[in-house]
Amino acid sequence: MSYNPEIHHRRSIRLWDFDYSGAGAYFITICTHERESVFGNLVDGVMRLNYWGLIVRECWEHLPNHFSQVALDEFVVMPNHVHGIIILNHGLPNVGARHASPCSRITPDCGSDENTRATHASPLRESGSKSGSIAAIVGSFKSAVTRRINQTRQAPGGSVWQRNYYERVIRDDRELNNIRQYIEDNPRKWADDENHPTYLHDT
């Protein structure tokens, strides 16, 4: 079945009897607080990240440095959300992940310094999330981004993300490739995205 964003993106498809700390591939979507467009702009179908968007990308790329079982696949930062594929491989070879190249710091022309390097929080245990689970990994990522963005705007306690996130267990290679393509095409199809401000303001 082709990837259908109305089914696979709008709502969380959380399997309550599934072990989200187990080996497998997971499609993750995280939206900003009130779907505000704060990470940059689309120009001719290409995402131009601002300073906050660069923080998001760097924190994501550093996930394997903080969680040894994590391999990263396709990923994109959009103006008001991110899409990414996380693979928990637990040492299994040939899982098909496209590893990101972790950055040591943000691009120099953005004014990087010691205070803006990626530092992830300890895995979160909110709502009973299990150490090393997708919930803990996403919670750590969201906390790291929030902390660093709030440092730049001198607004401790400010909200960056929506409270929850969306995830889908990827069942096979065909579904994996469909989702990879969906993520890759997201910037080019931004005008038709349900998260585009035009659609949000009409609801």
Image (cartoon, helix red, strand yellow):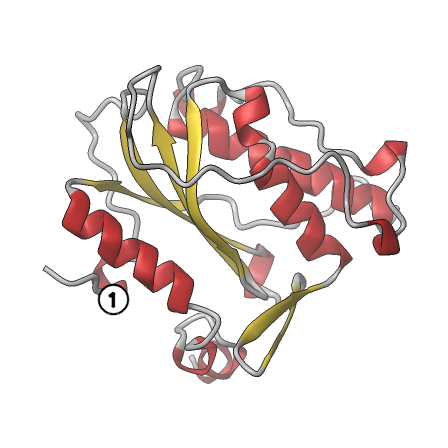
Residue farthest to the left? 1
Specify whether 135 is left or right of 52: left
Q: Identify the residue shown where x is 74% and y is 34%.
A: 104
Residue at image coords 56%, 61%: 34
Reading the image, the residue beneath label 1 is 6
Q: In this view, does 66 lie to the left or right of 26?
A: right
Rendering coords of residue 65 (x, y %): 58, 23
Above or below — where is 40 with respect to 100? below
Badge 1: how crowded within 10 Å, few (<14), some, or many (20+)?
few
On the rendered image, what quadrant is the C terminus found in?
bottom left
Snapshot quadrant of residue 19? top left
Q: Which residue lies furthest to the front in this view?
A: 94
Residue 174 shows in the view? yes
Residue 131: give x, y in percent of width and height.
44, 15
Front residue (pair 51, 103): 103
Q: Is residue 23 above or below residue 58?
A: above
Circle 1 SS class? helix
Q: Which amino acid does label 1 sit on?
A: Glu
Q: Can you give x and y, in whole percent of width and height, for residue 128 in the image?
A: 40, 19
Residue at x 45% of width, y 84% of height: 202
User: Which quadrant holds residue 52?
Assistant: bottom right
On the rendered image, what quadrant is the N terminus found in? bottom left
Task: Tally the marks.
Answer: 1
Q: Residue at x 36, y 37 (%)?
A: 97
Give percent across and percent down for residue 61. 58, 38
- Res. 10 visible in picture: no
| Position of 4 relative to 133 (above/below) | below
